[in-house]
């Protein structure tokens, strides 16, 4: 399973990228706004740092305008994946950009039917939002499972990019289901390292090492 980091904060991406934890990056208009940076500038900086796909989202609603924005974003770097919403205009834009050789990430997916349409439109990535479904007491992981089954049934090549991930458990659950990629905020990726028994065990080892005066260097 690939890890994309879901942020536009350069320092946080760099920290994880230096550890080999970043296979790509996803942004959205809210994350760009939070960074306080110009979308074109910050996206270029991210693309220069990270080898894998970097998703940059359009902000237009009509297909022609989306296409113009998508083409401009695609010119930033070869590793741009243009992010479009799962609307008819977004699907139309997806088809055209895909035919032009640009990677497309179809976002705001909340149903298996939407995921089928994105695959038919040639999307490189489909982004089902787990956390936002869970927030409504619906089952985000079940959606990932359904899309995995459907894509495998028909050999759709669109990558399942599990998004809106809120916890470390979501990451391993998505891996078990067979999501191709998980995109998560840096704090969630870091939280995957935490375990109370690791902390407890380490405390005991440190106490014994101190008692015995163990020194290595
Ligand atoms: C990533 O592509 C999505 O935009 C992001 O994961 C949404 O996450 P949120 O629901 O926590 O805002």
Image (cartoon, grey):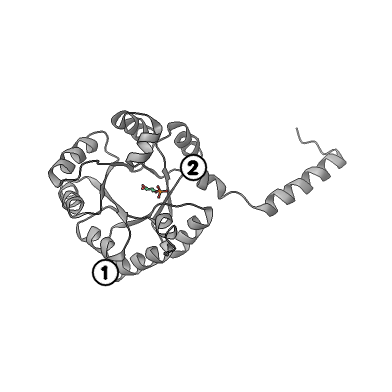
Mark 1 or 2: the one toward you: 2
Q: Would residue 109 appear left or right of 175 to someone viewing this image?
A: left
Q: Is residue 33 visible?
A: yes
Badge 2 density bin: few <14, some 14–19, many ≥20, Cα 10 Å = some
Q: Is mark 2 within 8 Å of ligand 1?
A: no
Image quadrant where residue 179 sits: bottom left
Q: Which residue is mark 2?
A: 186
Label 1, label 2: how many angstroms apart (C-alpha)? 34 Å
Between residue 167 and residue 50, name the one nearer to us: 167
Q: Mark on residue 28?
A: none
Between residue 183 and residue 131, name the one nearer to us: 131
1 or 2: tag closer to the N-terminus: 1
Residues at discs 1 and 2 in contact (Cβ within 8 Å):
no
Q: Assign the N terminus to one quadrant of the image.
A: bottom left
Under tag 2, what secondary structure? helix
Tell me the residue at 16%/46% (across/down): 62
Q: Assign the C terminus to one quadrant of the image.
A: top right
Where's residue 7, x and y in %? 41, 40
Q: Would residue 85 appear left or right of 213 to someone viewing this image?
A: left
Where's residue 202, x and y in %? 73, 47
Under tag 1, what secondary structure? helix
Q: Is mark 1 within 8 Å of ligand 1?
A: no
Q: Which residue is mark 1?
A: 154
Badge 1 density bin: few <14, some 14–19, many ≥20, Cα 10 Å = few
Where's residue 203, x and y in %? 76, 46
Q: Is residue 51 visible?
A: no
Number of numbered labels in the structure image: 2
Where's residue 80, x and y in %? 28, 40
């Amino acid at each position: 399973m690939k890890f994309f980091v879901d942020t536009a904060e350069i320092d946080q991406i760099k920290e994880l990228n230096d550890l080999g934890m970043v296979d790509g990056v996803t942004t959205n208009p809210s994350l760009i706004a939070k960074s306080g940076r110009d979308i074109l500038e910050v996206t270029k900086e991210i693309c220069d740092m990270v080898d894998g796909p970097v998703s940059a989202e359009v902000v237009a609603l009509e297909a022609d305008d989306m296409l113009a924005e998508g083409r401009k974003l695609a010119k930033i770097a070869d590793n741009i994946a243009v992010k479009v919403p799962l609307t008819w205009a977004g699907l139309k834009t997806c088809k055209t950009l895909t035919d032009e050789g640009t990677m497309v990430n179809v976002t705001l997916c909340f149903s298996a039917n939407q995921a089928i349409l994105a695959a038919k439109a040639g999307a490189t990535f489909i982004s089902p939002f787990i956390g936002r479904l869970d927030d409504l007491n619906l089952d985000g992981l079940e959606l990932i499972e359904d899309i995995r089954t459907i894509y495998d049934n028909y050999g759709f090549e669109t990558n399942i990019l599990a998004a809106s991930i809120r916890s470390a458990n979501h990451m391993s659950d998505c891996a078990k289901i067979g999501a191709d990629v998980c995109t998560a905020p840096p704090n969630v990726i870091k939280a995957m390292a935490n375990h109370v028994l690791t902390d407890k065990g380490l405390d005991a080892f440190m106490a014994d090492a101190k008692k015995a005066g163990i020194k290595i260097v």
